[in-house]
């Protein structure tokens, strides 16, 4: 079982992850696959409830086309923690696509990847039940400074040097 | 038991002379030993009677593949116990000498520096 | 004691490595407690250069662009003594490896390294690895400029880059600034060649898709000229396309060379241009001239003494050493001195703690406290005075480090192989030793001339066998070590992939085969031709006939 961390704290998950053939709930957020979204786009967007898409590691957010900013949630899957494509997808969502909704990390990822995920634009994490919020915050604090810019817009070491 | 089964199969196939029947030659299985790396220092260890020893010559030789598999399964407790990593079975000759060059080197040390590795260490009943 | 002319950490760099050490200390503790399984821990330890090998753990220490200070060399000697067995090994990526390391000691080793501005960050793992350069950087008149400031900029930009620490595979970058390629640029995943355009402006040619291993490739040019301020944006664009588009389903098809050869160079360029245009528009990766100048200042060359060009003469041993191990320096009266770690019969690339300490003293006495590591597992004192060469030679002789064989047939590159490496199929070091002993006669070596033998113990090609004039690949043929011969590879500016000759040779046959190949060269060569030139002119057939001739007779 998993629980949701959002904006630095445990949060209620308002989305139901739906199989491709599962009926849509009456209300509440619906999280569907890209394939289903592409097939049922109109009816999904017509719902008076939040819609989210879960992208597999091989699926670029650009496949969402112009609809990307109509989604309240985009979940990016890590099928194996070694598969780092989602880092680029998150970064793409925040920069090229200007996406401002929730970008959630789901699947198999390590505590040690959380800081990188945070930098490239993830703001929500689906974590195991025994994961603590202290662990989450510790993950973000292990390295004080960063050398390179990323989607988080954080000042880099070069910026800090210039401020001296 | 295995040989008797193969004999029966042979007799059966000859009696009924079906389309060409290919019998696989009876597999020769080497005896095996169980090895791993110790987690904290990477040292090479060998299974013996439910525990691990430092030197390959002191390790247990399994002539029965089933016993080898039982030992490999038992070794998992030391994996989950974070004592060892990557246990696996490897082939040895009946006298215990490893079949593969890799295991010979792993047991002894580098061939190009004979003063390093286990080949150079004391062998007086040293255990982990 | 002199201060080296290289990058020095400021408080940000120092804190970065210190925090990285503590992070790894915590990861080791979590591994020992079982909070991390081995499967989870493995990528984390790899990104700190820690392998589990055939006898113990192996730790790979980064030597950025092959440059070390005497202080750092002394620290490596100390680590060799305290935590290992009194020696270390220089690799084909100019890093240092220790082969007898305990996991529990690694956090302390990393702390010791951090105290001298060293680290093991990203020396393994599926991330950007150590950035390498010409070992003569800053000392040769050939270069447009010193490539190392750009290497340092790339090093910082790629360190724990959040988007690129879980790439499909490793990613190796090199930077060059001379026509003569001493850093094997075209064999890298990505390389930058510093160039001048027709308007006289300095910029960067970027190539990508080189790589060794199961399917070797030489790099393609991605862009002929990238403006200085755009270089990080372009490099990031290439990495982004690689991270997004590489396969993840077959570990043997996940290097960038496979991606480029699958989609084609044109398509790769198109995809990179798209990312590049976006990054340029964003401006966040722009490299300002002031920043390049600031980093470049760290590498400002020492004030060379005004001296006449006057190469000292000496006895036959000294003259032989000069013939191969001394190269011209850009400042008159100075020289570049190569120290080969290839004493006949010794382990290629290995160096003892005592030798490291002695060399540190020589660095201070003769080379402004600085040394370079080459991708051919040798060392270079970059800035020595010609008049000091006799004293340098004498000290090297006393250390068994004066082997006069730089670039000759006994200057063999060999990976650790099955004697040490968990991935290996065959031993490589004893092959190198046997061949070196076979060709030990110096007159014979000079008669043969430049001939680079490179030996790998498995297809991962850490011995760079694809780039050997004669390459040797160790394979496992039904439990027996066999050795395939390859001919005609090159890691220089004339990069080429070695051609496999045919069936392999046994452990006791390979040196004979090499000898017959060399003899065939000596018979067939035209005046002035190196082995590589003769091979390129006459092809494989005569060498193959020679190599297998005695096999058939037997």
Image: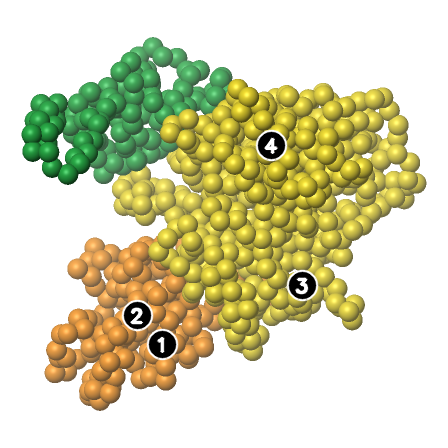
Chain colours: A orange, B green, C yellow
Callouts 1 and 4 in the same chain? no
Callouts 3 and 1 in the same chain? no
Disc 1 on helix, strand or loop? Answer: helix
Residue matched to label 4: C545
> Which of the pair C307/C493 is nearer the observer?
C493
Callouts 2 and 1 in the same chain? yes
Callouts 3 and 4 in the same chain? yes
Q: Residues within 10 Å of mark 2 (few under 14, many from 20)?
A: many
Calculate the distance from the C-alpha at mark 2 to the C-alpha at mark 1: 10 Å
Image x and y of residue C227, in percent: 67, 69
> Which of the pair A138/C63 is nearer the observer?
C63
Residue matched to label 3: C204
* Figure check: C335 above or below C225: above
Whether the residues at callouts 2 and 1 have beta carbons within 8 Å, the answer is: yes
Disc 4 on helix, strand or loop? Answer: helix
Image x and y of residue A124, in percent: 30, 68
> Which of the pair B61/B9 is nearer the observer?
B9
Residue at screen point 30% across, 81% down: A71
Residue matched to label 2: A55
In which quadrant will I find the N terminus of chain C? top right
Residue matched to label 1: A63
Calculate the distance from the C-alpha at mark 3 to the C-alpha at mark 4: 44 Å
Image x and y of residue C146, in percent: 72, 53
Callouts 2 and 3 in the same chain? no
Q: Nearer the viewer, mark 3 or mark 4?
A: 4
Give the side of residue C75 with respect to residue A3, left or right: right
């Amino acid at each position: 079982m998993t629980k949701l961390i959002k904006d630095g704290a445990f949060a209620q998950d308002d989305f139901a992850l739906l199989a491709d053939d599962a009926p849509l709930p009456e209300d509440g957020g619906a999280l569907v696959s890209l394939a289903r979204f592409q097939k049922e786009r109109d009816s999904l967007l017509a719902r008076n409830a939040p819609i989210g898409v879960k992208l597999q590691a091989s699926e670029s957010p650009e496949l969402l086309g112009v609809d990307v900013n109509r989604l309240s949630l985009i979940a990016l899957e890590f099928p194996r923690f070694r598969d780092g494509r989602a880092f680029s997808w998150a970064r793409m969502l925040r920069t090229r696509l200007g996406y401002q909704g929730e970008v959630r990390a789901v699947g198999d990822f390590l505590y040690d990847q959380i800081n990188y995920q945070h930098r490239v634009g993830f703001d929500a994490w689906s974590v195991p039940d025994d994961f603590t919020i202290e662990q989450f915050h510790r993950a973000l604090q292990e390295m004080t400074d960063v050398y390179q810019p990323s989607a988080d817009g954080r000042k880099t070491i070069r910026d800090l040097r210039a401020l001296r | 038991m295995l040989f008797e089964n193969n004999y029966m199969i042979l007799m059966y196939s000859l009696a009924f002379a079906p389309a060409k029947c290919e019998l696989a030659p009876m597999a020769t299985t080497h005896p095996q030993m169980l090895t791993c790396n110790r987690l904290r220092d990477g040292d090479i260890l060998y299974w013996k009677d439910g525990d691990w020893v430092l030197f390959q010559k002191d390790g247990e030789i399994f002539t029965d593949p089933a016993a080898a598999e039982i030992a490999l399964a038992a070794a998992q407790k030391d994996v989950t116990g974070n004592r060892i990593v990557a246990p696996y079975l490897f082939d040895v000759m009946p006298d215990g000498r490893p079949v593969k060059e890799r295991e010979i080197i792993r047991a002894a040390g580098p061939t190009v520096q004979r003063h390093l590795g286990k080949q150079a260490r004391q062998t007086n009943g040293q255990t982990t | 004691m002199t201060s080296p002319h290289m990058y020095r950490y400021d408080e940000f760099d120092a804190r970065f490595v210190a925090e990285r050490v503590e992070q790894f200390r915590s990861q080791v503790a979590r591994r020992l407690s079982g909070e991390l399984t081995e499967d989870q821990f493995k990528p984390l330890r790899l990104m700190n250069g820690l392998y589990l090998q055939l006898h113990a753990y192996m730790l790979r220490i980064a030597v950025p662009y092959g440059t070390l200070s005497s202080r750092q060399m002394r620290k490596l000697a100390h680590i060799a003594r305290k935590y290992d067995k009194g020696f270390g090994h220089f690799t084909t990526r100019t890093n240092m490896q220790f082969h007898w390391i305990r996991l529990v000691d690694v956090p302390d080793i990393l702390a010791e390294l951090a105290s001298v501005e060293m680290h093991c960050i990203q020396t393994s793992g599926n991330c950007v690895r150590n950035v390498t350069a010409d070992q003569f950087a800053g000392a040769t008149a050939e270069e447009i400029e010193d490539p190392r400031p750009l290497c340092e900029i790339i090093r910082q930009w790629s360190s724990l880059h959040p988007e690129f620490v879980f790439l499909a595979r490793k990613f190796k970058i090199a930077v060059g600034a001379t026509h003569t390629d001493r850093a094997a640029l075209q064999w890298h995943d990505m390389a930058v060649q510093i160039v001048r355009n027709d308007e006289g402006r300095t910029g960067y040619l970027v190539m990508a898709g080189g790589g060794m291993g199961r399917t070797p490739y030489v790099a393609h040019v991605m862009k002929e000229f990238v403006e200085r301020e755009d270089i990080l944006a372009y490099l990031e664009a290439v990495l982004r396309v690689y991270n997004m588009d590489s396969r993840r389903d077959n570990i043997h098809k996940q290097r960038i060379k496979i991606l480029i050869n699958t989609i084609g160079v044109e398509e790769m360029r198109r995809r990179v241009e798209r990312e590049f245009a976006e990054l340029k528009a964003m401006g966040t990766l722009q490299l300002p001239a002031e920043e390049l100048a600031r980093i470049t200042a760290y590498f400002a060359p020492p004030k060379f003494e005004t001296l006449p060009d006057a190469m000292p003469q000496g006895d036959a041993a000294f003259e032989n050493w000069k013939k191969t191990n001394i190269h011209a320096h850009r400042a008159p009266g100075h020289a570049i001195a190569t120290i080969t770690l290839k004493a006949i019969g010794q382990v290629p690339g290995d160096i003892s703690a005592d030798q490291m300490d002695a060399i540190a003293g020589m660095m201070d006495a003769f080379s402004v406290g600085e040394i370079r590591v080459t991708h051919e597992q040798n060392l270079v004192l970059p800035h020595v005075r010609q008049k000091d060469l006799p004293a340098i030679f004498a000290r090297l002789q006393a250390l068994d480090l004066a082997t006069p064989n730089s670039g000759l047939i006994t200057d063999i590159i060999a990976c650790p192989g099955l004697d040490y490496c968990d991935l290996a199929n065959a031993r490589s070091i004893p092959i190198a030793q046997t061949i070196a002993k076979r060709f030990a006669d110096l007159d014979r070596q000079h008669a043969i001339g430049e001939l680079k033998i490179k030996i790998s113990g498995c297809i991962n090609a850490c011995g760079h066998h694809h780039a050997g004039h004669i390459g040797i690949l160790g394979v496992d043929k039904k439990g027996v070590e066999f050795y395939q011969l390859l001919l005609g590879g090159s890691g220089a500016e004339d990069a080429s992939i070695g051609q496999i000759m045919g069936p392999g040779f046994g452990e006791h046959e390979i040196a004979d085969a090499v000898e017959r190949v060399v003899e065939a060269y000596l018979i067939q060569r035209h005046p002035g031709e190196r082995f590589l030139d003769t091979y390129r002119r006459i092809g494989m057939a005569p060498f193959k006939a020679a190599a297998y001739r005695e096999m058939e007779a037997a």
